[in-house]
Amino acid sequence: MQSLAIIGSQWGDEGKGKITDLLGQKCDLVVRYQGGNNAGHTIIVGERKIVLHLIPSGILHDHCVSVVGHGVVFDPRAFKEELEHVQKAGVDVTPDRLKISENCSVITYYNKLLDGQREAKGPVKIGTTGKGIGPAYEDKTSRKGIKLKDLLNKEILAQKLKANMMEKEILFKHLYQVDFPPIEEEVEKLYELGKMLEPFLCDTFSLLDHAIQENKKVLYEGAQGVLLDIDYGSYPYVTSSSTGAGGIYTGAGLPGKYVDEVLGITKAYTTRVGEGPFPTELFDELGERIQRIGHEFGATTGRKRRCGWLDLPLLKYTVKASNITSIALTKLDVLAGLENLKVCTAYKYKGKVIDCAYPGIELSEVEPVLEDIKPFHDDFKTDEFSPELKSYIDTIEKGIGIKVGILAHGPERSEIKFVKNYFN
Ligand code: GDP
Ligand code: IMO
Ligand code: MG
């Protein structure tokens, strides 16, 4: 295998960072292609905990080149902070190991402000991360976006930012009635940040094109999850990018044939941060226990993650929507030892029983059909699994029609079992 996509198969936070870090060991390049610093990908190595938001999770491996493709919306202020955090943790991030597309759209201070104002005062609360992601993608698709390369020329930057602000000024002054810094101040700040960024900027399209021609091994690291996809997700409670495999082709700049397989990272239960329907959500003590044992707090905002049972109709849908070819089942250790486990195998919806959450199904109106899972007590010290755990895995594989290739049973690098070999 030359290339593999890592995709979140649920509502994010499935453990993509951990799996990308592990498989990144065997790769030449790790590529982020969508989202921004709304992502929070955690890597634990011994005593070190590193949370990455913009920098790809291959950065811990010296031989690996980390690439930020043009589909990412990039906040230079957030990047500066992250760079400092990562370097403090002892990771050397040099321009030959981190390549950022000069065509990434910039998240400006105004995008962040707009995100916050809408969440606080707008008619629909999405529960965003408040990082300015939606407004930055809006600027991009409305062709008013600032690109990273624009930060290198003060005149062009001032011109573009002025045009970009025409409508926002009116919103800030008259609709939201909030103070905002003058354009000149933002130009100065972005220009300074541009100087810091310049050594990392390049044309990542040709970089990837050449790497692929030279048979390099490439890992694509998705952020968020398919259920947060702007087209495939539970709209409007989604993020603003293509979080599924489709995002690779637009956000990294590669024709489809170059991705060999798609690995769907899947938590052994389900979590969600922010608003929106969640059919298997638990509102009882058991849900709180899973939240506690799994340390389910957002890696970006620190919010408590909502917890519920694994939802096979949703998973079956995301497998189809992103052409997922195998899954990595994570956080099995969190369920180990718990009694009264359940899994959702189907929905009752409008008088019918359905086993795939196709679009058009109103998730807030479905009644989940829950089946009992036999409790398992595995300590994962050997490669043998208990018959109860095997039976849970079997139910999942039958429910979604593809195989589990990886089982993760703890946050550490060593807490993993490979059923399938991804890169030789
Ligand atoms: P990501 O956004 O998909 O990369 O996931 P996050 O980093 O936001 O959240 C996953 C959390 O679970 C992190 O704190 C990881 O360290 C942790 N984690 C990953 N895999 C496992 C696992 O198998 N078991 C346990 N207990 N924790 C895990
Ligand atoms: P990783 O990559 C979980 C959610 C937010 C909110 C919605 C829209 O760590 O899995 P946004 O700020 O993107 O406009 O918020 O999407 N969200 C995530 N939830 N993990 C993430 O990333 C997320 N990124 C965004 O909570 O519901
Ligand atoms: Mg996360």
Image (spheres, rainbow, N blue to C red):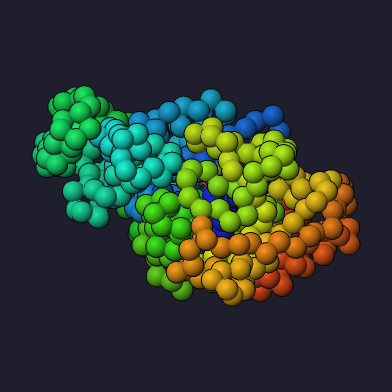
- Tell me the residue at 46%/73% (across/down): 257
- Horizontally, residue 400 falls left or right of residue 95, namely right
Percent x, y for residue 302? 54, 32
Q: From the viewer's perspective, is residue 398 above or below residue 276?
A: below
- Horizontally, residue 187 falls left or right of residue 108, namely left
Percent x, y for residue 348? 61, 68
| Along the viewing direction, whichever of 366 and 138 lies nearer the viewer | 366
Percent x, y for residue 101? 34, 49
- Tell me the residue at 39%/54% (across/down): 236
Percent x, y for residue 159? 10, 39
Given the current orientation, which residue lies at the most extreme front position? 351
Q: Is residue 374 visible?
A: yes
Instruction: Give the position of the N terminus as an image quadrant.
Output: bottom right
- Tell me the residue at 47%/40% (across/down): 53
- Horizontally, residue 158 falls left or right of residue 350, namely left
Q: From the viewer's perspective, is residue 221 above or below residue 124?
A: below
